[in-house]
Image (cartoon, grey):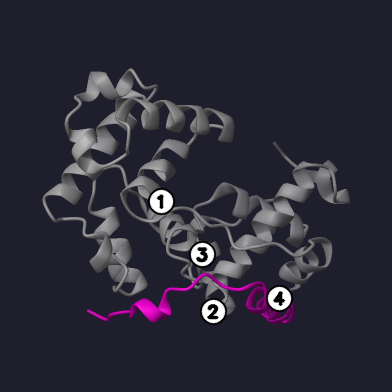
């Protein structure tokens, strides 16, 4: 199993991201479109460890506002979001904080995995990307998208691309001026050419998509929502 040192885990700087954007724009015409239309941005950053992973699970398939409200209730109810505090509550108690039955089960599964050593966040930081994905996705409720986004946002890993993300698929469709989105498999393949800057490519496309949604870019009329 390949290992990564702690020195490797750094959030990409603004200078690095600016250089990566230029490299990506030269590699792919769609990324050039996104680059020209999107101002500078910072790397998305979230807390690492158990709270960070739980927060990502809560954010799945709900609005930002709803996820924030549920997180606030969970944090207030538990005091501190730790595996021990979660495991002291049953599913019904977690549901009382606003979690769905499914997400309550997922949060408990993550807590159990952390408590019994199946999920070791310190060890995870030293694994290469695929080994880290394998550790995370072995846990109930953690799919590849969640694993990849966790490693990008919470650990600052710069060469991941969560191709299952619908916003990324739609952003690339718009930048390509295409009628249909690429499939997850096809998008993973396309992103191979963007190494070692796939994380910056993801941030660029997310920023482009956000600008389109807000009507800041003329392609907004082309959105098929």
Q: Which residue position is annotated with label 2?
A: 195
Image side of residue 37 versus residue 139, left or right: right
Q: Main secondary structure of the magenta part?
A: helix
Q: Residues within 10 Å of mark 4 (few under 14, many from 20)?
A: some
- Residue 113 rendering spot, x and y as whole percentages: 18, 48
Query: Marks 1 and 2, how far apart in space?
Result: 20 Å
Q: Secondary structure at mark 2?
A: loop
Query: Marks 4 and 2, how far apart in space?
Result: 15 Å
Q: Residues within 10 Å of mark 1 (few under 14, many from 20)?
A: many
**Residue interval drawn in magenta:** 1-27
Residue 193, quarter of the rendered image: bottom right
Residue depicted at x 33% and y 17%: 96
- Residue 60 seen: no
Q: Earlier in the sequence, mark 4 or mark 2?
A: 4
Please state the total of marks drawn on the protein image: 4
125 or 84: which is nearer to us?
84
- Marking on residue 146: 1
Q: Earlier in the sequence, mark 3 or mark 1?
A: 1
- Residue 153 rendering spot, x and y as whole percentages: 49, 58
- Marking on residue 161: 3
207 or 145: which is nearer to us?
207
User: Which corner quadrant holds the N terminus?
Assistant: bottom left
Q: Secondary structure at mark 4?
A: helix
Q: Secondary structure at mark 3?
A: loop
Tell me if label 3 and label 1 are in contact, CB under 8 Å. Answer: no
Q: Which residue position is annotated with label 4?
A: 18
Tell me if label 3 and label 4 are in contact, CB under 8 Å. Answer: no
Query: Marks 4 and 1, how far apart in space?
Result: 26 Å
Q: Earlier in the sequence, mark 2 or mark 3?
A: 3
Q: Residues within 10 Å of mark 3 (few under 14, many from 20)?
A: many
């Amino acid at each position: 199993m390949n290992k990564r040192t702690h020195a490797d885990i750094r959030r990409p700087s603004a200078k690095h991201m600016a250089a990566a954007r230029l490299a990506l724009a030269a590699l792919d015409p769609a990324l050039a479109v996104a680059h020209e239309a999107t101002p500078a941005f910072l790397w998305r950053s979230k807390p690492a460890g158990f709270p960070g992973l739980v927060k990502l699970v809560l954010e799945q398939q709900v609005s930002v506002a709803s996820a924030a409200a549920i997180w606030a209730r969970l944090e207030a109810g538990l005091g501190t979001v730790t595996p021990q505090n979660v495991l002291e509550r049953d599913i019904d108690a977690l549901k009382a904080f606003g979690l769905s039955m499914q997400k309550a089960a997922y949060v408990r599964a993550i807590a159990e995995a952390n408590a019994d050593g199946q999920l070791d966040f310190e060890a995870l930081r030293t694994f290469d990307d695929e080994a880290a994905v394998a550790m995370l996705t072995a846990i109930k409720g953690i799919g590849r998208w969640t694993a990849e986004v966790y490693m990008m946002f919470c650990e600052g890993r710069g060469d991941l691309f969560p191709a299952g993300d619908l916003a990324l698929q739609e952003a690339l469709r718009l930048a390509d001026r295409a009628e249909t989105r690429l499939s997850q498999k096809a998008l993973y393949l396309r992103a191979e050419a963007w190494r070692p800057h796939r994380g910056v490519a993801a941030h660029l496309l997310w920023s482009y998509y956000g600008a389109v949604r807000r009507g800041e870019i003329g392609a907004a009329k082309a959105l098929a929502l």
